[in-house]
Structure formats: structure tokens, C-alpha cells
Image: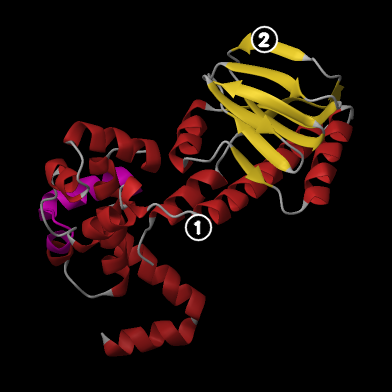
């Protein structure tokens, strides 16, 4: 399967590290106001009743029932009520590790989503509140599990929202960039070449690529070349020199790089892989291979 940006992001999200700081259900009377602050944590806010507002970096948002807001860390934030009704909401503060903040930023999530299953979201916040007051050793695990479920709901709803309002010209077509890399692993791929393909300045391309992929373009190309070399070593009878040529490397450089990444040489990798394959297939397969050699 050829890599795509969705597949890469899915793999990064699988390793996401998020920790709940605090969660609660709060009801505020008309006229309530929380002055400007710049928290170093993320906030979820889900309105159940009434209306409120949030000012995030000088942009005002209406907080209405059925909407789930995600307020990023490091933004200037103010909150208040709207109208004559009490403003009731569930909220949660959580932190992400630095690398995961970059992953979240690369997703370009909207500031809010309209929740389709309100009961499910309320139940998740209720669970979070209950686990928060638990004294069991699994408390943090359960809190993290609920938070990840909320994040998953938010991302799923964001995808639906984006599909309803497509804007294909506003983003780099990363899948096309990855497809170009995949089709040219046997060539000498230059960053400047990739940047032109993406219609970006090389410096900006490197920064954007790293924020989304979690590594530089050169590191990504190297990783894909090693992955292709592994496939060719196990799936073909090509000599190592021919494998090296197909992944755009000199024979000696592939051997050195392969050993650095895998801990063994390409020849050892092929031999061990073949032996393990024969062991799994049983003695008949081993005999058959010897007969055909």
C-alpha cells in the first residue's frame, strides 16, 4: 500500500500522548465574565444550555448548545455569557506532548464542530468527571481513554465539516507529493524539486513537511528507500546491487545505511527472512526449496 498523508497522520495519532488536567460541569449566571488569559493547555468546551461567547486571539465565537469547541494552548482567551439565561457547559483542560502539538496543528482542525450525538458526548464528560474523583490505579488510564474518544469524535466531525465545504486550492496536495516521492525513489530526489512540485519555497516546504510528517523530507525519502529495499530483498531474487540501484543508492551505501537502520546487512536480512519463512511453512517447504535450488 502506497503511503498517503491520511495514513501517516493515522500512525502519528496512534501514538498521541494526552493527559487530562481537570474536567467539570459548570453553570454560570448572566453577566459572568472570565478575563483574558493565555493557558499552556488545551480546552474542550461543550455547551448544554444557554449561550456564551469566547474571544480567542481577538476572534469572537458564539457558544451555543450542541457545539463542541476546542481552544488551542498558547492563545489569548476570554469568556462570558450571552443573554438572560444561565450558561451551562461541560469543559475539560488537557495537555499534549510537544511533538503531538505539531501533529494537532497539522490537522488544521476547525474551532468547533456541531455534535451529532449529543447524548454520547454528555456521557463521555460525565465519565470523565466520575473517573476524576476515583482513587483506583486505573484512574489516569480511564481519563485518557475518555479524552481520546472525545478527540476522535471531534476529528471525525471535523472531517464531515471539511467535506461539506471543500477548498482544494487552499492546501498543498500532500498526497501528490508523497506519490511523486514513491515513483522516484530510484532517482536523486532534491528538496528544491519537491518544493517546486508543491509550489512552495524550499524553506517553507521543509518546515511544512516536517510539521505534518514528523521528519524532514530527506529523512522521509530515506525511510521509504529502506522500506522498498526490504520488500525487494524478501519478494524478489534481485542481487543486492540491483536492489540498491532501484532505491537510488550505491551498493556500499545501501549496505551501510541498511545496517544502521536494521542492525544487520541486506544479505543477512534476506537470509534470516527466508529461514523464518521456511520455518513457518514447515519442513516440506524447506525440502521443496532445497530441491529447486
Image quadrant assignment for residue 4:
bottom left
Residue 12 in percent (x, y) is at 49, 44
Horizontal relation, residue 64 to residue 73: left or right: right
- Where's the C terminus, which quadrant? bottom left
Is 81 rendered above or below residue 63? above
Determine the main secondary structure of the stretch shown in magenta: helix
Residue 249 is inside the magenta segment? yes
Residue 89 visible in this rendered orientation of the protein: yes
- Contact between labelled residues 2 and 1, with CB atoms less than 8 Å apart: no
Mark 2, other Cα within 10 Å: few <14 / some 14–19 / many ≥20:
few
In the rendering, at what x and y percent does residue 45 appear?
71, 32
Residue receiving disc 2: 35
Q: Which residues are magenta?
A: 244-263
Quarter of the view holding residue 231: bottom left
Q: Let me know if residue 200 is in the magenta part.
A: no
Residue sitting at x 66%, y 31%: 62
Q: Residue at x 10, y 51 (%)?
A: 188
Query: In the shown orientation, is residue 96 left or right of residue 182?
Result: right
Q: CA distance from mark 1 to mark 2?
A: 36 Å
For residue 245, above or below residue 79? below
The residue nearer to you, when weighing 116 against 292, is 116
- Could you say which is closer to the camera, residue 183 or residue 52? 52
Residue shown at 24% from the left, 33% from the top = 204
The residue tagged 1 is 163
Residue 126 shown left or right of residue 259 in the figure: right
Q: Which residue: 48% across, 54% down?
A: 165
Camera-side residue: 221 or 246? 221
In terms of secondary structure, where does tag 2 sit?
A: strand
Count of residue discs:
2
Q: Is residue 171 visible?
A: no
Amino acid at each position: 500500500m502506497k503511503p498517503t498523508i491520511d495514513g501517516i497522520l493515522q500512525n502519528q495519532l496512534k501514538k498521541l500522548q494526552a493527559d487530562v488536567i481537570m474536567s467539570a460541569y459548570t453553570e454560570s449566571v448572566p453577566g459572568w465574565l472570565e478575563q483574558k488569559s493565555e493557558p499552556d493547555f488545551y480546552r474542550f468546551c461543550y455547551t448544554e444550555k444557554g449561550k456564551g461567547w469566547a474571544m480567542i486571539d481577538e476572534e469572537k465565537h458564539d457558544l451555543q448548545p450542541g457545539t463542541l469547541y476546542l481552544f488551542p494552548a498558547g492563545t489569548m482567551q476570554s469568556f462570558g455569557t450571552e443573554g438572560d439565561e444561565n450558561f451551562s457547559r461541560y469543559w475539560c483542560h488537557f495537555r499534549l506532548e510537544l511533538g503531538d502539538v505539531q501533529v494537532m496543528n497539522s490537522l488544521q482542525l476547525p474551532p468547533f464542530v456541531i455534535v451529532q450525538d449529543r447524548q454520547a458526548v454528555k456521557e463521555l464528560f460525565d465519565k470523565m468527571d466520575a473517573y476524576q474523583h476515583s482513587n483506583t490505579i486505573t484512574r489516569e488510564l480511564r481519563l485518557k481513554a475518555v479524552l481520546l474518544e472525545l478527540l476522535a469524535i471531534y476529528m471525525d466531525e471535523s472531517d464531515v465539516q471539511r467535506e461539506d465545504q471543500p477548498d482544494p486550492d487552499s492546501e498543498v496536495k500532500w498526497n501528490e507529493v508523497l506519490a511523486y516521492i514513491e515513483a522516484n525513489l530510484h532517482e536523486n530526489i532534491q528538496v528544491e524539486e519537491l518544493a517546486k512540485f508543491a509550489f512552495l519555497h524550499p524553506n517553507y516546504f521543509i518546515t511544512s513537511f516536517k510539521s505534518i510528517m514528523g521528519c524532514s523530507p530527506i529523512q522521509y525519502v530515506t525511510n521509504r528507500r529502506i522500506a522498498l529495499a526490504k520488500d525487494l530483498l524478501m519478494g524478489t531474487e534481485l542481487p543486492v546491487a540491483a536492489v540498491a540501484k532501484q532505491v537510488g543508492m550505491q551498493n556500499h551505501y545501501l549496505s551501510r545505511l541498511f545496517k544502521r537502520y536494521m542492525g544487520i546487512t541486506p544479505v543477512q536480512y534476506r537470509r534470516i527472512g527466508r529461514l523464518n519463512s521456511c520455518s513457518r511453512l514447515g519442513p516440506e517447504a524447506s525440502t521443496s526449496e532445497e530441491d529447486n535450488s
